Amino acid sequence: MSYCLNPACPNPENLDHEEICQACGSQLMLQNKYRVVKPLGQGGFGATFLAKDQLLPGEPCCVIKQLRPTATAPHVFKMAQELFVREAETLGKIGNHPQIPLLLAYFEDHQQFYLVQEYVSGDTLQREVKQNGPFSEEGVKQFLSEILPVLQYIHGQKVIHRDIKPANIIRRNQDRKLVLIDFGAVKNQVNQAATNSSDQTALTAYAIGTPGFAPPEQMAMRPVYASDIYALGVTCIYLLSGKSPKDLDYNPSTGEMLWEKHVRMVNNLSDHFANVLRKMLEVSVRDRFQCANDVLRALDLEPYLDSLAQGMIAGPPSGPSPSSASKFGPNSLNSGAGAFKGSVSSNSVSRAAMAIRARRTRLEGTDVHSGISGYRGNTNRNGSNVPSSDNFTGSKGKNIKRKLDAQEVQTSYSKGRRDFAQQNLSLLNLQKVDLSEAIFHQARLNRTNLQGANLFRANFGRASLNQAILRDANLSKAYLSYADLEGADLRGADLRDAHLMNANLRGANLCGANLTGARITEEQLAMAKTNWMTVRPTGKRGGIW
């Protein structure tokens, strides 16, 4: 279908390859290269559309955002236009981060203003919760470990996002990273005063973020960096409970969100994590965490320290900058609508990681337990009692994870659990089970039998799969970065579009495996066993790339 961008068109839908709109006579090709396929959403001052760039090989998809205020008052249009320009400038400045939208073009055409942004295929976290149910505590901690460095990066660029919420975070299908979208409400200066009352009214109506997610100071037009921390805290409550802010009560005296009873109906939160959430959600800015790194320190994100430190030191990939940025998914609204690359201060994070490890060393052998090295058990996403973190207390007061058996894994998964991070699942017989999109980050699966299993889009980042049996398993689009697959049996496995960068494939058997589109180096393949039936990343069998 070709879709007309004329706001006044009575019937914007046209047949494929039409050049002129049959209803209003407008040109359908934007800038003689973009053909709009369908609308994606309408916000307060912009409408977004899915389009194809017909001048590039393969006609890749992109997202076009058109300035289209819902109100027609002149001062509203002026404010909307300023915000539109600000969004383009912001994306041009910070859009070289791999988890922030890339701006492809910005122009005026027939007195209409447009942003063109790269399309990101994936689901928003809002849709994930609606489809799969609430996250567990472990899942939300992993979410925070991925998104906080992104937030720290944009704050380092003196940008406040002002609209962080589950609908503005997409899990990219390609690599399962979280992508932060919708920079239409950004503020580039903290506490910049409005110059007149009409502008302030317009900004209040269209650009302060989403009610319930935005903290009081932001609603009062005085956002600070900690305002994004509050919105992130509300997002965590949604992920843990499935409840949006409008479904929650508030303390009439303090304005505090009364979230705990809703979360505890689904998740048995650890006291430590509950305290972190409370401080993220402090009504008073003074009592709230001031920056993303403060939250990272408070969480003691031990399961992710190594990858966190490495990702933050790495910095964003070099390459063409500006005129770049956007990855908007099909389920988003407003501007059209996440693993740790970014030019964030690595020293502070490294120091925090060293401090945590030092403290653990000092506490070794005592009854004191801090951080999250062991998670408390919790109910599954549907609220029933399913083995979750499966912890018990050892003789010295430390939490120790009980090893799940194969039946418990399958039962937990069937009842909604997807988080098996850090679990010891070695030597289990999980042949032909469905564990698609499950999280096995840093899990131990040595010699585990997963023959014929459905592991589509599963996350095995830094997992140990030494000598695991993965013959004929579906690992398409699986994330296996830094996984240890030494000696693993991957004969006939479907590894199409899998992410295998930095995975250890020494002695892994890839005979007959399909690696079409997989992210893997020739050096990695040289360490594995292959034959003429192995389909290389290029789609060709055996031989050369």
Image (cartoon, grey):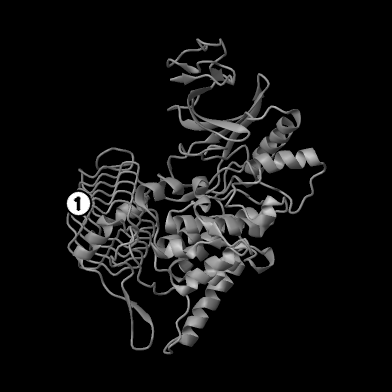
Residue 354: x %, y % from top left = 54, 76
Determine whether 59 is above or below 231 in the image. Answer: above
For this rendering, which residue is in front, 178 or 370?
370
Residue 200 seen in this snapshot: yes
SS at mark 1 in the image: loop
Asked whether 227 or 29 is in front, the reply is 227
Residue 494 lies left or right of residue 14; in this view the side is: left
Q: Residue furthest right?
A: 195
Q: Position of residue 80 (x, y in %)?
A: 69, 34
Q: Within 10 angstroms of label 1, few (less than 14), some, or many (20 or more) residues?
A: many
Q: What residue lies at 46% left-to-right and 36% top-to-bottom?
A: 330
Residue 135 locus on image (x, y percent): 40, 58
Horizontal side of 35 relative to 378 (left or right) equals right
Q: Which residue is mark 1?
A: 491
**Along the line of sight, the residue nearer the viewer: 25 or 254:** 254
Q: Amino acid at mark 1?
A: Arg
Q: Nearer the viewer, residue 319 or 132?
A: 132
The N terminus: image quadrant = top left
Give me the residue at 30% from left, 58% from top. Answer: 505
Query: Which quarter of the rendered picture does the C terminus lie within?
Result: top left
Left or right side of 152 for 197: right
- What residue is at 67 percent from the left and 40 percent from the top? 205
Is residue 158 among what the camera can see?
no
